Image (tube, helix red, strand yellow):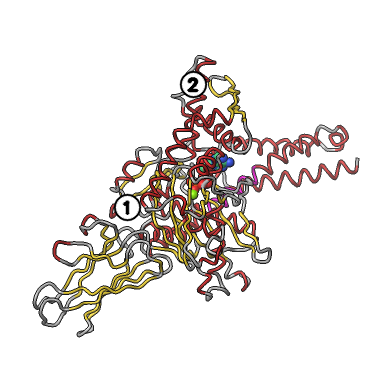
Amino acid sequence: MAKEDQGLAIGIDLGTTYSCVAVLQEHLNRVEIIHNDQGDNTTPSCVAFTDHERMIGNTAKNQAATNPQNTVFDAKRLIGRKYSDDIVQKDKMLWPFKVIAGADDKPIIVVQYKGEEKQLCAEEVSSMILGKMRGIAEAFLEKPVKNAVVTVPAYFNDSQRKATIDAGAIAGLNVVRIISEPTAAAIAYGLDRRNSCVEKRNIFVFDLGGGTFDVSLLTIKDKNYHVKATAGNSHLGGEDIDNKMVKYFVKEFKRKNKVDISDNPRALRRLRTACERAKRTLSFAITSNVEVDALFQGIDFYSSMTRARFEEINLELFEECMETVERCLTDAKMEKSSVHDVVLVGGSSRIPKVQQLLQDFFIGQDLCKSINPDEAVAYGAAVQATLLSEGIKNVPDLVILDVTPLSLGISANVGKLMSVVIPKNTTIPVKRTHVYKTLHDNQSAVDICVYEGERTRACDNNLLGFFKLRGFPRAPRGHPVDVTFVIDENGILSVSAEEKTTGNKNKITITNDKDRLFTKEIERMIQEAEIYKDEDKKFLRKGRAKNGLDDCIYKIRKALKKDDINSLLCSKEKKDICSAINRATNLLDGTNEKDDTVVFEDCLSELQSMLERLKAVDQNA
Ligand code: ADP
Ligand code: MG
């Protein structure tokens, strides 16, 4: 890698339904949203497995209807969570793929790949998506990319953030920083630079995506971002809008054709795809067609929807979003008139009605929408990535800071109350020391339990880890022990305790060892990722050989139809060509799927030389 590329860093918005990658091209002074091989700005966060190959992105999503058990999506809903988590238990019911409890209550996704059972953790699935996004960037930049800033929702806790870093590591990426999605969107608009932030600036971020709805109220002062409040609905987004449209057209199909397709998954899936496309069109056109050939029992379905009708069938859903907006402001105890900027994020906030309702709510205030809402998060991540990369890394005031999403504290006292050491929304990196006082005379040791959460009783919060500090000197109760919390730039927490007179120390880095992947495991997964990559490559090679064969057969057959060529060939040559074509067609018919790539390639080079010979004959004729 060239020296100047080592610092090159990209921004990745790893979304629940769609992901997006961007890079700041310094020589152009412009952020580029990098389109994938299909020309799309976002790529489905979807991975699929079949008997022959692994697919990521569009190809995976497109085959979901025919291979539901082995098409994995929503990995972001699992990452950094425990299997027994209520959220996981509820989501599991909605997924067509299998999720089981692994060691230490870690959720494991089970799929069939190449005829064998494969067990994957959420980090691995996310790593495949991150790897895909990295590949998209590398194809565009025409050079390897190693570093990335990856975004996560503002409410992601410590273990979800760490698991996301692990996913990056498995994909061979160095995650230079994890930042919150709303923070990234605000960075994209350079809001921290407006009015030089002498005063506090209040920013409302409205993120309506594919399957989730999140609103956050941020304040920026002196480049510091604080998340004042978040609210949302973890199951509300573009997919619900698609479903409403599907329901509407199922009724119409029934009315027109007297058949009900509501029990036919394949027909529903095809209709849903057409609806999503129509929905996207309705964000800039006032009417859109919905056309599906042979939707059911050979009956074509041709219909259309106006923007007015679209708004009518979704109004309830849009209004629910506005109620959430109101709740978030109430939680933050802020008047809407105090909001300086309203930022639109998420593909579904492209919908004009959503924008209008939001603008009405904020009484005519302009919305920040000059950056495409589904690109704003990756855009901001790319800006942050460049600020952090080589060369300007040491300019601290350019580096925008993030905050802790939950309060962190210890419990070592009577009644097991939570003593907060680092309150929620503290800017990171941060170091805070709390003096613990012994409870008994001559107490010789203490158990330090580290929690995250907002509840008063420690046991109602989430236990992150614990350790013991021993060997205190004989002393009356109230003897001090320093407990220090350090959170680094990525939100990773370490806690240490020290008894000053003896110098006795103990420390833990909250790696959530139970949940988090061990280095060894990550190494194994990196190796597996290489194997997957290798297999994908082989599959591609075989695919190319097959295409080549098909093309060659066609050209040879065409050449043989020319009389002058035919007459110049001896009968042995003709026979050889015919038998080679037969062999090739048999191969392509796939009667023997296990045939090696080399068999295809050998056959291809044989046919290619025959084609060359025919061309030469043609020129001489
Ligand atoms: P995520 O929620 O995973 O972060 P996005 O923010 O990219 O993903 O949102 C994806 C959703 O946005 C999908 O439901 C998609 O159909 C929807 N969407 C994308 N473009 C448009 C558009 N032009 N109009 C309406 N909805 C759109
Ligand atoms: Mg998103």
Quadrant of the rendered structure where residue 444 is?
bottom left
Amino acid on which disc 2 is placed:
Lys
User: Residue 593, position in %: x, y?
Assistant: 55, 40
Residue nearer the viewer, 618 or 271: 271
Image quadrant for the N terminus?
bottom right
Q: Secondary structure at mark 1?
A: loop
How many neighbours does mark 2 have within 10 angstroms: few (below 14), some (14-19), or many (20 or more)? Answer: some
How many neighbours does mark 1 have within 10 angstroms: few (below 14), some (14-19), or many (20 or more)? Answer: many
Per the rendering, the mark at residue 251 is 2
Quadrant of the rendered structure where residue 439 is?
bottom left
Q: Is residue 589 above or below residue 400?
A: above
Per the rendering, the mark at residue 106 is 1
User: Residue 500, position in %: x, y?
Assistant: 22, 83
Q: Secondary structure at mark 2?
A: helix
Q: Is residue 155 magenta?
A: no
Can residue 215 be spotted in the picture?
A: yes
Q: Is residue 541 magenta?
A: yes
Which residues, given as a range, are shown in magenta?
534-546
Q: Earlier in the sequence, mark 1 or mark 2?
A: 1
- Disc 1: residue Cβ within 8 A of ligand 1's nearest atom: no
User: Residue 621, position in %: x, y?
Assistant: 91, 40
- Disc 2: residue Cβ within 8 A of ligand 1's nearest atom: no
Which SS does the magenta portion mostly show? helix
Can residue 527 be spotted in the picture?
A: no
Taking the image as shown, residue 130 lies to the left or right of residue 463, namely right
Label 1 or label 2, whichever lies nearer to me, is: 2
Residue nearer the viewer, 583 or 89: 89
